[in-house]
């Protein structure tokens, strides 16, 4: 080799194939046909899952048939529960986006197209398990019937009934009683916290497991890598969910490290059993979640699951995706719409009909509208009645220190003076 003949180096900067006005080439996803990928026993060694980290677990085919070894063979009633919860999530999202446009709430983040992942995993977990979600898993809450929609909307409105007393940005919910850890705006922090929670459960000899959530973009944060190392070293009972919706605001997943590899493959490299799964296939999500949960509960350690899906909507109400990706991109995404796919399956089974779908849709629309109306009675961004200002100083520490007491009293005195002047 001639060592003198050197080429000019070039920096590689990944780009999506589709920009506004173009058509995305989705062949980079490397899909497997429904039913084609093997289902190893839950005792499988992490290294023996490496082929699964580069293929795609799928159950539902294009017509809605359930195929192959991952079919969880759920009772139709369970599937109907799942479809209903996904519809509820979609309707809630759509209504809250409008409420933001009407200035009733300051901000909103939707999960259009990603409903199956949170809902099907919620139905695969057990009471007492703890999820460490991002802002894009309201389905974990909406799949439950013990969470009041009115209370959730009061959080969005930061009003008098906001359980978080107006201290958190909308959608950063917190429901300890429902196994939904407080959402933080700082990306990826929850991923390592989930591993620590799972380690604590193991230290106590408990039977509960953790479910950690992260987006494709946030896997580039160092907490992602720390979480994988700790989960592997201590064989923590945790499901490490990576939701690859192809986008992190305006950046394509390739620039987070997804080009010519998969996020599931990161797990195998760290000694963690890993799966890459069709995130728009309710049956595949449920089956893979059960597989991972059983591993965790049997002291077989963590499982990383990359859910391949697509962010159907804008990143948030502050984002306009038509500036950086094709407007009709979601319509071309080869894994389709999770609600339409489960609906087709249930209709094939004879356990659902167009009439029932429409009736359920109307019922859920009415339920969400009624909850919104009731929540507004306790105040909204437009109408006022915010959580009391004095609560701002509480819970910074367990006991309020002297300097916070002084700041609170100063504020209350100023408020009283103002009222006196105005009276
Ligand atoms: C530490 C940190 N860096 C940056 C941000 C700003 N930010 C908020 S959401 C987001 C994109 C996250 O993308 P991804 O992890 O793919 O999740 P998705 O929003 O697609 O669900 C960014 C960069 C943040 N909140 N925290």
Image (cartoon, rainbow, N blue to C red):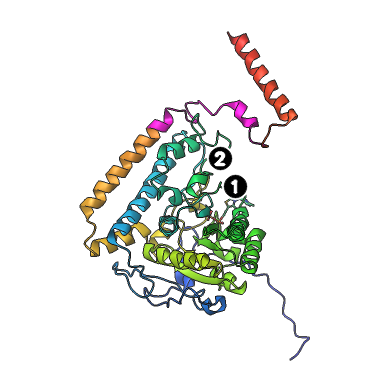
Query: Please, which residue is most extreme toward the bottom here?
Result: 1
Q: Which residues are magenta?
A: 374-396
Quarter location, residue 310: bottom left
Name the residue beneath numbered marker 2: 169
Mark 1 / mark 2, whichever is N-terminal = 2
Left or right position of 30 against 227: left
The number of discs equals: 2
Label 2 crowd (10 A; few <14 / some 14-19 / many >=20): some
365 above or below 420? below
- In 3D space, how far apart are the residues under numbered discs 1 and 2 (Cα atoms)? 8 Å
Which residue is at a point 63% across and 66% down the rendered structure image? 234
Judging depth in this view, the residue of 246 and 341 nearest the camera is 341
Residue 184: horizontal and vertical position, in percent? 59, 47
Extreme-front residue of the structure: 205
Which residue is pictured at 37% across the width and 46% down the height?
A: 91
The front one of 103 and 268 is: 268
Q: Say whether mark 1 is within 8 Å of ligand 1.
A: yes
Badge 1 vs badge 2, beta-carbon distance below 8 Å? yes
Q: Position of residue 386 (x, y in %)?
A: 53, 28
Q: Residue at x 35, y 56 (%)?
A: 82
Which residue extends farthest right?
4
- Displayed quadrant of residue 348: bottom left
What kind of element bears circle 1?
A: loop
The dominant secondary structure in magenta is: loop
The residue located at (58%, 8%) in the rendering is 423
The residue where tag 1 is placed is 185
| Residue farthest top in this picture | 423
């Amino acid at each position: 080799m001639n060592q003198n003949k050197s080429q000019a180096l070039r920096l590689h900067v990944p780009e999506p194939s589709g920009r506004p006005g173009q058509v995305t080439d989705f062949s980079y996803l490397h899909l497997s046909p429904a039913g084609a990928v093997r289902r190893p026993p839950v005792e499988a060694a992490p290294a023996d899952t490496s082929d699964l980290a580069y293929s795609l677990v799928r159950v539902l085919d294009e017509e809605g048939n359930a195929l192959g070894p991952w079919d969880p063979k759920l009772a139709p009633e369970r599937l109907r529960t799942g479809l209903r919860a996904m519809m509820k999530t979609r309707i809630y999202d759509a209504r809250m986006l409008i409420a933001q446009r009407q200035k009733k709430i300051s901000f909103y983040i939707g999960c259009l197209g990603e409903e199956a992942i949170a809902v099907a995993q919620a139905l695969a977990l057990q009471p007492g398990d703890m999820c460490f979600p991002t802002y894009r898993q309201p389905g974990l809450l909406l799949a439950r019937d013990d969470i009041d929609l009115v209370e959730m909307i009061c959080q969005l409105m930061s009003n008098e009934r906001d359980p978080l007393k107006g201290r958190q940005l909308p959608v950063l919910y917190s429901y300890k009683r429902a196994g939904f850890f407080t959402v933080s705006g700082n990306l990826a922090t929850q991923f390592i916290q989930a591993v620590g929670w799972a380690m604590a459960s193991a230290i106590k000899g408990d039977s509960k497991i953790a479910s950690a959530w992260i987006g494709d973009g946030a896997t580039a944060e160092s907490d992602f890598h720390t979480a994988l190392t700790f989960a592997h070293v201590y064989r923590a009972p945790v499901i490490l969910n990576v939701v690859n919706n192809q986008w992190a605001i305006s950046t394509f997943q390739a620039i987070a490290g997804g080009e010519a590899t998969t996020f599931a493959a990161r797990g195998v490299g760290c000694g963690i059993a890993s799966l890459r799964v069709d995130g728009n296939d309710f049956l595949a999500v449920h089956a893979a979640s059960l597989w991972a949960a059983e591993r965790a509960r049997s002291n077989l350690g963590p499982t990383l699951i990359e859910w391949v899906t697509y962010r159907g909507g804008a990143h948030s109400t502050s984002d306009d995706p038509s500036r950086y990706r094709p407007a009709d991109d979601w319509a071309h995404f080869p894994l389709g719409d999770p609600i339409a796919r489960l609906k087709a399956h249930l209709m094939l089974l004879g356990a659902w009909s167009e009439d029932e779908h429409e009736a359920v849709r109307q019922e859920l629309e009415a339920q969400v509208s009624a909850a919104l109306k009731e929540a507004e009675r306790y105040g909204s961004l437009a109408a006022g009645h915010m959580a009391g200002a004095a609560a701002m100083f509480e819970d910074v520490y367990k006991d309020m220190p002297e300097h916070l007491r002084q700041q609170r009293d100063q504020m209350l005195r100023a408020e009283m003076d103002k009222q006196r002047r105005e009276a």
